Every structure is written in C-alpha cells, then in structure tokens.
Image (spheres, rainbow, N blue to C red):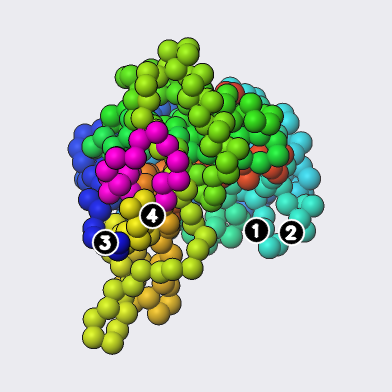
Amino acid sequence: MRKGGYLKRPVLKFRDGTALTPIEGFKLNFKPYRGAKSISCYVICKGNVLHAAKEMINNLIYGVKGYEGLEAWFDCSLNVHSIVKVDANDEYVKVANEVSEDHDIVVAFIPDEMAVEYEEDPYMPLKRILAAKGLPSQMIEESTCRHLRDNSYVLFNVALSLYSKTGGIPWTLSEPLYFDCVIGLDSMNKGVAATVAYATPLSFNWFIESGGREALTEAVISCLKEAKTYKPIRRIAFHKDGPLHESEVETLKAALNRAEEIGLVHDPLWCAFEVKSRFTPRILGTSALRFYNPEKGVYVQLDKFKAIVATTGFPERPLSPAQSPVRPIMVEAVDGSWWDFDFERALTDVYWLSELHWASGFTSTRLPITTLYAKRICSFWRAGVEPSKQLYGKLWFL
C-alpha cells in the first residue's frame, strides 16, 4: 500500500480575524490572539552596545518599515524599567542575581557565541539564574544588535518571542484538532518533559516531572488535568520524536488507567505516534528532468499506519531543491486502544501543530510543537536550567 496527497492547510486565528500566515495576520492588523497589554522589561548590556541596544528596543516598540512595532501590531506596551551596563562577561551573572522578580522578562545583549570562550559565555548561566527566579529571558547577540537592529524580519521575530515568553499566544488554529488532546513527550535521566495541546481554539501548556517511570505517569496526569479544564477528553494522541519504548508504552497505559480511576477520562480512545525527524527518505516533485521541493502539507503514506509528511517546503523554502532540499518527518502509529481512527486526520494534526512555532512569523518548524517544545525543555533542563513553576503557561524556552 502506498498513496499520498495534500493535507488540508491550517488557517490561523488571531483576535480579530484569520489568515494563512502569521505575517499576513499582523499586517492586516488582526492583533495577537491572547496576551498581556504591557510587558515590564529589564535590560542588561555592555557599554559598547548601549546606544545600539537602546535603538533596537525603541524599534521593537515603535517599529520600522515592514514591522510596525509592539504597540501597533501587538497592542502591547514594552516598559523598560532599567538598563544596566556591565563591563565584563562575568558581571552578567552578578546583575542577574540582583534582578527583581517583579519584572516580566529580562533582555540581555550578550557577546556572540563564537566571540567568547565557552566558560565565559553568559548565555547559559543567565538562563539558569533567571529561570530559577521565574523570569523568562531573551538573549540578543551583540552583532545582531549592531547590524540588524532596524531589520524588520529580526525585530518581528524578537517581538514574537517577547510576547510569547511572557504568556502571550500570538495566534492559534481556527479549526479544532482531530484529537481532543495531544500530548508530546521527551525524556532524559532527570525525568520527563510533557506538552499538551487541547481545546478549541487550541490552548497549550507544558510540565516537567523529576524521577523515573513514575515521572511519566505524573506528567501525563498533569496534562490531562490541564486539558479537562475545557471539556471532557475522549480521544487522546501521544507524540514522541523517536522510538517509543515498550516500557514507555506500558507506563502510558498505566497513566491512562489511573486517569480513569480519578475521573479525568472515561473509556479513552488513544493512540501513540512516533514522530521521527531523523531518517533518510525525501519527498521531491518532478517536472521533465528537474526536481522540486514539495509544497508544505504533501504526504506519502507507506502503509496503513506510517507516512512521510512535508511540514516544511514551498512557498517558505525555494522551489528548487539544489541548495536546500527539505527534510520531511515520518509519522507512525505504534500502539493504542483505537485503530480505526482517520490516519489522514492524525497526520493533519501533526502538520497543523508544526505551524504553531510562536518564535517565528515567517517559517514553520519541521516538528509539531508537541515534540519540538518537549525536546527544547529537556535540552535546557539537561544544561542545568531548572524552570520555576512561575514559568508554567509561559513559553520561556523559545
């Protein structure tokens, strides 16, 4: 069995309208779907970029050609309460330790990664300190500040990150997902990171649990409690980037049994999917003797429960693949209690969730945010960034 086609394209919902792309929605002045009216910001930078940093902050607030600013597009004011100068790389940490937790976010203009030795790079130490305080942070490299402070592409993406990291949702989906609740999983020695997408219009949150096998159970329970705040949950999908081990599947079953015992679900229909980003096959279109990148949303079904999906591609990527052949993802249903589900609709959920990367208004991600964000949380956690519970509901890891 082998067939393919085009998955339905997602329509994005903003506060005052719908659009096919994020930048289109903002240019039409639809305003972000949900978020704060004002953001309190604390800024750290070296004296040699102070003037450029102030100019970039000003551009973020009021805009430049091609990007009209936080106040116009996001209906949100950015209030800079302090700009603190540092003279050396080791002073960033000292300042971070003294930052008041009353602020919404810390913006740090830091040396370029390649310009400093690893042990002198303030990026990760700042992340650790501020996350423990419950403060999201936005790092901007000094070269970006100097040379791209009036670049509309850069400014728009930074504005999206500031808005999202402080609890905002710039856009969501205008139509419901096929599954009532989609839970993304990633694990490491410390424990488990889980994300949950649910409701109509879609809402999103994340959880971490320390420990062994019990951590996965607790993370799933937390996700189901979050999702049940909107409506009863019946159809549940689990996403994981990479293989789902037998022990993990057994733990998911145990977690669902417990969830049923405590009244979170009743007779759930569930399915677990491996959403793999690392594998060899590509999808290419052909015309005569020429090859082309596929359009986003193209899929090739390899068997009843396995398919390759192009979540990136034309028009975001060049039509010609000579310089940048897009890499699809593989989606496979590997276990569950429900096997007569609509597989194309399940693939559509994966595709649509890849359109919800809230740190970029121009390009989507290969992976759905369910697995992408779980992986990001684990990568920070592995590096010693222990997020405070004050950060729940905020996309601090973007």
Image disc number at residue 306: 4
Q: Position of residue 356 (x, y in %)?
A: 37, 44
Q: Secondary structure at mark 1?
A: loop
Most foreground residue, 108 or 226: 226
Name which residue type carries label 4.
Lys
Q: Earlier in the sequence, mark 4 or mark 1?
A: 1
Residue 287 falls within the magenta-colored stretch: no
Residue lying at the far bottom in this picture: please name it. Answer: 289
**Mark 3 and mark 1: span between their CA atoms?**
44 Å
Q: Secondary structure at mark 4?
A: strand
Mark 4 vs 3: CB contact within 8 A: no
Magenta-drawn segment = 332-349
Name which residue type carries label 2.
Val
Name which residue type carries label 3.
Gly
**Mark 2 and mark 4: span between their CA atoms?**
45 Å
Answer whether residue 127 is visible to the viewer in this image: no
Disc 2 crowd rating (10 Å Cα; few below 14, some 14-19, many 20+) is few
Q: What residue is at 73 percent from the left and 31 percent from the top?
A: 97
Q: Secondary structure at mark 3?
A: strand
Q: Earlier in the sequence, mark 3 or mark 1?
A: 3
**Mark 2 and mark 1: span between their CA atoms?**
7 Å
Q: What residue is at 29 percent from the left and 73 percent from the top?
A: 285
Q: Earlier in the sequence, mark 4 or mark 3?
A: 3
Image disc number at residue 4: 3
Residue picked out by circle 2 = 116
Q: What residue is at 34 percent from the left and 25 percent from the top?
A: 234
Q: Position of residue 396 (x, y in %)?
A: 54, 36
Residue picked out by circle 1 = 112
In the picture provided, is 44 more to the left or to the right than 262?
Answer: right
Which label lies toward us, 4 or 1?
4
Mark 2 vs 1: CB contact within 8 A: yes
